[in-house]
Amino acid sequence: MAVDIALAIFESPKRAHYQQDSTVKVNLDRTSSGFCIGVQGTIHLAEEKLEALDGKLYCLGDIVHNEVEVKRLEKLGLITIDNDEYSRLKHAPVLIRAHGEPPSTYATAEINELSVTDSTCPVVSKLQRTARLLHELGFQIIIYGKKAHPEVIGINGQCDNQAIIIKHPDLSNPGETEPIHFSRRTALISQTTMDVPGFYTLKENLEKLFSEKVDAADRNAALSWKDIRDIDLTAEMTGIRPLPQFVYKDTICRQVSSRNQKLHDFAAANDIIIFVAGKKSSNGQVLFNICRQSNPRSYFIEDEADLQDEWFSDNGEPVGSVGVCGATSTPMWLLEKVARHIENTYAP
Ligand code: SF4
């Protein structure tokens, strides 16, 4: 449910073009915006460690895809490093963020005697385990996701970096499907922050593609991939029941997808939407697109400096309501700050 944080009259001389008796409501979305549980856990662990260590903790990659939050933690002593810097680091405390890491990262930590605080989100850990087991069972793994995304790099690491990564559900990029071996057992999984409709579109398109390419004997199986659960993996591993040749597991995090409908409704209920997220946030792009589909007057910002005056008026009249919302990587304190800034600037 959206929380109404302000109702104010326009009377700022700076904004003289607005009618003085006009009002604008700033609605802050507290239920479907802000850190997900995984990111909350990481931030909490980082703050705890920084306090215990008296302020010096290395983090491999941005702790969260939100520059403003990264800067806040860097002021407390968090040092963000890239993979090259990590490989040279020795005898130091390092935080593994919620996205998780491939096995090679842990091997480096052991060699270089790094003290690792692992805050991989439990949802991601479970997905990594699924990918590893399917790979060990001989499946060719297809990941619906973005090749360069750290979570995908971590999952691919569980498959000896042999997974096939597809970002376009319509299979419009031939380079993505080119490495597929159609005669192999194949399993489709997903990066946790991809969109649910895209995942099922990809599954259907893979079913069509495989059914055209496989031998006649396998055509029926290729036309209908089996939805598997953890128990099915255990059944194959223990020899109780083999898995079929083509399987899929919807591994999209519901912390993200369950927000979709709520965010859609929130966007529709406001005249304009100010969506706050880091530009690197994959989840931010997905959720922003949902807002934009529901309300074309949705604007993406990183912080209040990106706000533009013209968004807040309709032919010289102030808009009636402004919805402020964000991604799972957007801290609530930042959303509150943006809402307060809008309130002070456009509804003082
Ligand atoms: S979006 Fe889901 S999987 Fe990703 S960190 Fe948050 S809770 Fe974990």
Image (cartoon, grey):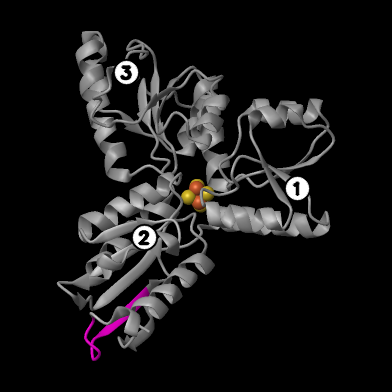
* Label 1: which secondary element: strand
Which image quadrant for residue 109? Answer: top right
Q: Residues within 10 Å of mark 3 (few under 14, many from 20)?
A: some
Q: Earlier in the sequence, mark 3 or mark 1?
A: 1
The label number, if any, that marks residue 57 in the structure image: 1
Q: Nearer the viewer, residue 236 or 164?
A: 164
Q: CA distance from mark 3 to mark 2?
A: 34 Å
- The residue located at (20%, 58%) in the rendering is 296
Reply above or below: 238 against 178. below
Quadrant for the C terminus in the image: bottom left
User: Answer yes or no: do the residues labelled 3 and 1 have beta carbons within 8 Å?
Assistant: no
Q: Say left or right for 141 vs 25.
A: right
Disc number for residue 275: 2
For the residue marked with disc 2, what is the amino acid?
Answer: Phe
Q: Secondary structure at mark 2?
A: strand
Segment tinted magenta in the rendering: 18-27
Reply above or below: 8 against 63.
below
- Under circle 3, the secondary element is helix
Disc number at residue 177?
3
Say if the magenta span includes residue 26.
yes
Residue visible at 27% across and 76% down? 321
